[in-house]
Image (cartoon, rainbow, N blue to C red):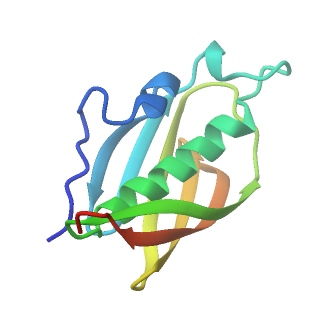
Amino acid sequence: MAKEFPLKSKGFHPFGELIGLEFTQSEGGFSRGVLEVDKRHLNPHNVVHGGVIYSMADTGMGGAVYSCLNEGELCATVEIKIVYMAPVTSGRLTCDTKVVHRGKRIAMLESEVKNGERLVAKATGTYSLFKTKEG
């Protein structure tokens, strides 16, 4: 049975809360995270910092794969490759992530980050899947 990824659980993901990332969906190997851009997210050129977008993809991947984990399993990022396609200065960012492949020890994922309908970044990632000491 898949683990539940609490969408509105305060304290479940402190870093996500720090940057203002909220999840609206995490189930069946898919997640959707949203972030309202504000001045805290901007770099010195008044464009959203690439680290914010990367963090959305990484966290979205965690949310998607988490929905495929069984009791007694955890996951961790192995690697992520991201391509930035357009700058963002304002609005809402949406990160849709899907599990492309889930094996016994490795999962492969894809994320798309959009600003409205405009694709601003695409990422692929690999996650390690492993049993907890209790599992």
Quadrant for the N terminus in the image? bottom left
Quadrant for the C terminus in the image? bottom left
**Residue under the point 49% across and 23% down:** 18
Q: Quadrant of residue 99?
A: bottom left
Relative vertical location of residue 129 with respect to residue 11 in this rendering, above or below: below
Q: Work out which residue is located at the far front of the displayed protein and give it.
A: 133
Q: Position of residue 55 (x, y in %)?
A: 59, 42
- Can residue 117 be seen here? The reply is no
Q: Work out which residue is located at the far right of the displayed protein and give it.
A: 45
Left or right, 22 with respect to 97, comes to: left
Relative vertical location of residue 23 with respect to residue 98 in this rendering, above or below: above
Q: Position of residue 71 (x, y in %)?
A: 19, 66
Q: Position of residue 79 (x, y in %)?
A: 65, 64
Q: Quadrant of residue 40?
A: top right
Left or right, 86 with respect to 76, comes to: right
Left or right, 25 with respect to 95, comes to: left
